[in-house]
Amino acid sequence: MTATMRSHNERSNSMKSSRKKSAPRWLQITAAIVGNALEWYDFAVFATMAVFISKVFFPTAGEYVGLLLTLATFGVGFVTRPLGGIALGIYADRRGRKSALQLIIALMGLSLMIMVLTPSYNSIGIAAPLLIVLARLIQGLATGGEFASATAYLVEAAPVERRGFYGSWQMVGQGLSILGGAATGFALTSIFTEQELLDGMWRIPFVIGLIIVPLGWWIRRHLEEPEESLEARATGKKVKLASTLAKYPRALVASLCLTTGATASVYVFFYYMPTFLARQFHFALHDAFQAQVIGIIAMIISIPISGMLSDRYGRKVVMLVFLLPYAILIYPLFSWVQTAPTLANLIVVYAALSFLLGGYFGPLSTAMGEQFPAAVRSSGLAICYNLAVMVFGGFAQFIVTWLIHSTGVTLAPVLYSLAGGAVGVIGCFLILSPKELKLNKALSIERALAN
């Protein structure tokens, strides 16, 4: 026991020493959100440019089939997300958050480069859509580990009493990236004609993303490993997928439900909605993007507010306060827009629902990260997050497009988001209380000392 305690004290002294040399808080937050923001920016611009991408890479298909093929290409990367998430999550738990974050952003850069440089179908034939599919597969591998690794880093680097606020910036980064994608779509459709976009201007947002990659890699290179991660790795225990699944079933199910609640809304409400509004409600894409931008700004405002509130009142209470009214109001509000399809009404609906959704997002990443001990935090988050995103997010646009076409239910996307919100409410009730989390942490330390 004396040797064990001596070893533990040495590790503690090492942790204190590394803490003195740690990167500034702003750099830690930036490093945690930059890759995640880039991930969501990539998804946002792909979704907003879907109409043009379908004509560039699937010109021989009809308009409806071409759009479906493009949305399927968007979704195919989600097939590799669980694989990437598990592999990179285990890598982050074994080799450190910093190493994993650097590898992930390098893979993102490779995917963006393929998107930027791939010629059209008319230039190289079937090789063009195949290269785009390859880009989405690589993107899926990278993003599979991004949220889990970045969330684990941010939760571990933040002061304990402000984890909700710090974790909210992970979601602020996502909001800013979605805003960037929507604003880019708004700007491009305002500046260029449809033919100019088809001739190559649709690539501009992907070029912007590619330019960000070196900056993100440089920031992540200059980070220090969080104390909690170093301490967990110092035990020498290897992360095993089977043991993670067996030991933390409630944490996995809770996080799976929480992610489903977020995913079903984001991938439909923000990514698919401009296309939906243009095709079903006959809004101009320009107007749809305008309403979306206003809504996203409202969401970004509410995220850090709810993150701070969760540090005071608890994650569960704050998330439920925002998520329940969102789930209750989404259908009647969009029914109102369907009855009176004016830009003013659309802006009101987008702003109100986005503010509520942002309130749910604020504590979300911290709440999920806190469910797992540091030794399995990245891998545990990666499993539940990527499964939910693959099933309920990756092919959401494909599914709701097919549902509208086959059933004639115009508001099918809204019902899809509503169902996801209901699952998110279940997840809120399943998360562990602060008292249970403290007990779990104490048991983890006791086991580490015993070994």
Image (spheres, rainbow, N blue to C red):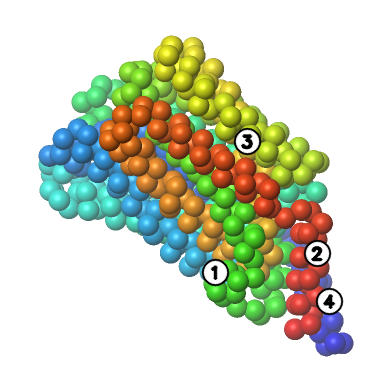
Q: What residue is pinned by disc 4? A: 9
* Above-or-below relation of 346 to 52: above
Distance between mark 4 and mark 3 Cα atoms:
44 Å
* Residue 300 pos. (x, y %): 60, 32
Which x, y percent locates residue 443? 78, 71
Badge 4 element: helix
Please indicate whether residue 404 sits to the left or right of residue 224 in the image. left
- Residue holding disc 1: 90
The disc, 1 or 3, on the residue closer to the chain's N-terminal end is 1
Q: Is residue 73 left or right of residue 176?
A: left
The residue that label 2 is drawn on is 439
Tag 2 near tag 3, CB within 8 Å: no
Callout 2 amino acid: Leu
Which residue sits at x=54%, y=58%? 384
Q: Is residue 217 at least partly visible in the picture? A: no
Sequence-first disc among 1 and 2 = 1
